[in-house]
Image (cartoon, rainbow, N blue to C red):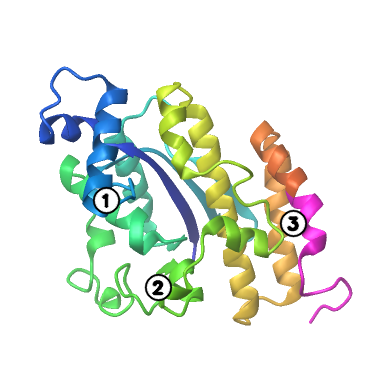
């Protein structure tokens, strides 16, 4: 099965925020801050917006298929609108890859559901639970206890919210670079500064961390030998080196420095 690890980055849905709160004359910054303030009032402190009020401005994937095909990329072009990004993502699911996420069940996919609903983006394959393909009756993107969509945070926590950890800390546990000083809370500021490319780069690194944790998970499941796991990690390095992009090179450098801390298989101890 092909593998598609992905991540999204979002900002407040300013258009709906303007309508909901009657902010007809406010600029983007003021609308966003008003939405955060309203959320803090509702939650008693947290300004993390409800999923239907997030707008997707970047999506990145790590796509693995065949013997040696691996691609790390942002979805669409920098100037693409939200509808185009979402449509391209769902179109990629026509070949039914395994989706791999970190907290995808709790955030990424619900956001995409509401935004697809808003824009009218159809995807019969994604929503199928057996009506069109009998094989999807039990193994589909919505069955929590199968792996066509594998939410690694959910699985590793044994579906126990009290055991959830962040992507950053899970990655660092494994000697991976993690978020390297960037996190989702800074996306809004980067957006206001016009740094869409910086957001797209950061999104790619989140997808990479997710994919590398997935490789480690396949090792502990017994689906990879130690040799196979190393080969898959080496393939990631090779493709990133070939791309020779600054944010990839920084990630590779941080990975090289931290991987010595990673416990587990030792060279020469291959099965």
Q: Nearer the viewer, residue 126 or 162?
A: 162
Q: What stretch of residues is rendered in magenta?
A: 255-271
Position above or below: 265 against 206? below
| Residue 46 seen anywhere in this rendered image of the structure | yes
Q: CA distance from mark 2 to mark 3?
A: 33 Å
Query: Residue 158: x percent and y percent?
Result: 46, 80
Give the mark nearest the N terminus, 1 or 2.
1
Quarter of the picture containing the C terminus is bottom right
Determine which residue is flagged by label 3: 234
Q: How many other residues sit within 10 Å of disc 3, few (<14), some (14-19) or many (≥20)?
A: few
Answer left or right for 114 relative to 217.
Answer: left
Label 2's element? helix
Give the mark nearest the N terminus, 2 or 3.
2
Residue 35: within the magenta? no
Residue at (38% x, 50% y) in the render: 92
Q: CA distance from mark 1 to mark 2?
A: 18 Å
Q: Nearer the viewer, mark 3 or mark 1?
A: 1
Determine which residue is flagged by label 1: 51
Query: Residue 147: x percent and y percent?
Result: 42, 74
Answer left or right for 24 relative to 186.
Answer: left
Give the mark nearest the N terminus, 3 or 1.
1
Residue at (74% x, 63% y) in the render: 231
Which label sits on residue 161? 2
Residue at (63% x, 82% y) in the render: 222
Position above or below: 254 against 198? below
Q: How many other residues sit within 10 Å of disc 2, few (<14), some (14-19) or many (≥20)?
A: few
Residue lying at the far right of the rendered structure:
268
Label 3's element? helix
Residue at (54% x, 39% y) in the render: 202
Label 1's element? helix
């Amino acid at each position: 099965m092909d593998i598609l690890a992905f991540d999204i980055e979002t900002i407040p849905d300013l258009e709906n925020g303007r309508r909901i709160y009657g902010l007809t004359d406010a600029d983007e910054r003021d609308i966003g801050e008003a939405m955060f303030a309203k959320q803090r009032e509702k939650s008693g402190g947290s300004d993390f917006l409800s999923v239907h009020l997030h707008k997707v401005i970047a999506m990145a994937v790590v796509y693995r298929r065949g013997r040696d095909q691996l691609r790390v990329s942002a979805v669409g072009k920098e100037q693409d609108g939200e509808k185009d990004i979402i449509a391209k993502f769902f179109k990629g699911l026509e070949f039914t890859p395994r989706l791999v996420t970190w907290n995808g069940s709790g955030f990424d996919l619900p956001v995409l559901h509401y935004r697809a609903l808003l824009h009218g983006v159809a995807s019969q394959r994604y929503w199928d639970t057996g009506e069109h393909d009998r094989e999807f009756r039990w193994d589909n993107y919505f069955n929590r206890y199968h792996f066509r969509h594998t939410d690694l945070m959910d699985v590793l926590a044994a579906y126990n919210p009290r055991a959830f950890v962040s992507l950053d800390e899970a990655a660092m546990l494994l000697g991976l670079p993690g978020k390297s000083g960037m996190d989702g809370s800074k996306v809004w500021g980067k957006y206001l500064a016009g740094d869409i490319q910086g957001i797209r780069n950061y999104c790619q690194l989140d997808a990479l961390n997710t994919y590398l944790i997935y490789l480690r998970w396949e090792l502990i499941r017994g689906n990879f030998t130690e040799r196979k796991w190393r080969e898959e990690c080496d393939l990631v390095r090779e493709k990133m080196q070939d791309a020779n992009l600054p944010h990839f090179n920084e990630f590779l450098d941080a990975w090289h420095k931290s991987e010595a801390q990673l416990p587990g298989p030792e060279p020469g101890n291959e099965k």
